[in-house]
Image: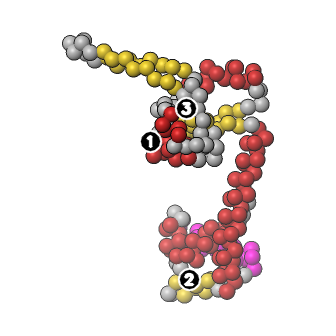
Amino acid sequence: MYNPRLSIFLRAAETGSFNRAAEELFLSAPALIKQINALENELAIRLFDRSHQGLKPTKAGESLYRDAKYIIQYSKASVRRAQEAMQEEEHIVRLGASPMTPPNFLLELWPKIHAACPSIKFQLVPFENTPENAQDILRHLGMDIDVVAGLFDDRMLSLYPGCAAFKLSFEPLSNEVDKDWQLTSTLSINLL
């Protein structure tokens, strides 16, 4: 959407050095200088005063610096809004998936869901299942992830008023120890 050379220009202006900017952007200094020169030629303006002490943006460079940040931010937001609009049109449900909360249940439900709502599509969104991350996902449900399967209780859900849950299944879990110990325990849980 925007000229990617603007990002290179911003980094050079912020570091005050082509070498430091190149290092931070994982480019060679000559490649970075070539990009800056091309941008200056394309815009027909001189962006930097170059000296042995480093780089100093010209008045035109200072003006572009202020505007470039806005251009990049606005461009990224514009693309994000367009992607969200496309997902709304396509009726995509973003399903959070992790090794601890695999979406296997969806495979069993998919034929019924597809028969009832053929326009719905699912997008699997991988996430790391840590207590902190799970809480963050529940707090922001509907932003990056729409649905997540897992073990929830009423207490946990009461902390996040915007969330709702329903029971998909009731699964007994067994834990067996070596027979010399003669200990077997069974725990039943609700999957919501």
Q: Nearer the viewer, residue 105 or 189?
A: 189
Give me the residue at 61% from left, 69% from top. 8
Residue annotated with mark 1: 130
Quadrant for the C terminus, please: top right
Asked which secondary structure carries label 1, the reply is: loop
Mark 2 is on which residue type?
Answer: Leu
Asked which secondary structure carries label 3, the reply is: loop
For residue 57, above or below residue 167: below
Residue extent of the magenta highlight: 27-44
Give me the residue at 71% from left, 61% from top. 75
Q: Tell me where residue 90 appears, x and y as whole percent.
A: 76, 38
Mark 1 is on which residue type?
Answer: Thr
Compute the Cα span from label 2 to label 1: 45 Å
Mark 3 is on which residue type?
Answer: Ala
Compute the Cα span from label 1 to label 3: 14 Å
Residue annotated with mark 3: 149
Give the colour scheme shown: secondary structure
Q: Nearer the viewer, mark 2 or mark 3?
A: 3
Give me the residue at 52% from left, 84% from top. 54
Q: Tell me where residue 92 appears, x and y as whole percent.
A: 71, 37
Which comes sooner in the sequence, label 2 or label 1? Answer: 2
Q: Nearer the viewer, mark 2 or mark 1?
A: 1
Give me the residue at 48% from left, 37% from top. 155
Q: Tell me where residue 13 appears, x and y as whole percent.
A: 58, 77
Compute the Cα span from label 2 to label 3: 53 Å
Query: Mark on residue 55?
Result: 2
Which comes sooner in the sequence, label 1 or label 3? Answer: 1
In which quarter of the view is residue 1 placed? bottom right
Asked which secondary structure carries label 2, the reply is: strand
Residue density around tag 2, few if under 14, some if 14–19, many if 20 or more, within 10 Å: some
Q: Nearer the viewer, residue 151 or 127?
A: 151
